[in-house]
Image (cartoon, helix red, strand yellow):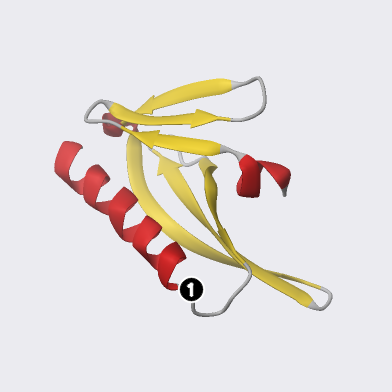
Amino acid sequence: MTVRGRGQSKLTPNGISFRYFLISRSIPWKDISGVEMRHHTARSNEWWDLRIVRTSGRTLVVPGAFTSRRSDPKFEVKFVIVHQYWMEYK
């Protein structure tokens, strides 16, 4: 959960860079086959996060794109921005 709320993502024309505590990684847009919003539930909690789907089929959580509210305009804007970058530079 810490990675989802505290990590950072940077969008560039070349790809998306993730930064967690001491770890950073970069994924080129050509290696991404989709961007999706995922809904999760556990006991009495629910949350949504953004994930990128790589061409290999594996998914990665986009750090910093996370909400626990059913309708969160800021979260939806983050989804739109990441999706637009992916569509433009893939």
Q: Where is residue 52 in the image (x, y as percent from the top left)?
A: 44, 45
Q: Residue at x 15, y 43 (%)?
A: 88
Q: In which quarter of the image is the C terminus?
A: top left
Q: Residue at x 54, y 47 (%)?
A: 64
The residue that label 1 is drawn on is 72
| Label 1 crowd (10 A; few <14 / some 14-19 / many >=20) | few
Q: Where is residue 83 in the image (x, y as percent from the top left)?
A: 29, 53
Q: Position of residue 7 (x, y in %)?
A: 59, 38
Q: Residue at x 40, y 66 (%)?
A: 76
Q: Where is residue 18 in the image (x, y as percent from the top left)?
A: 49, 31
Quadrant housing residue 66: bottom right
Quadrant housing residue 69: bottom right
Q: Residue at x 69, y 73 (%)?
A: 46
Q: What amino acid type should be assigned to the residue bearing mark 1?
A: Asp
Name of the residue lying farthest toward the right: 43
Quadrant housing residue 47: bottom right
In the figure, is residue 71 to the left or right of 16?
right
Query: Judging from the image, what secondary structure is the residue with disc 1 in?
Result: loop
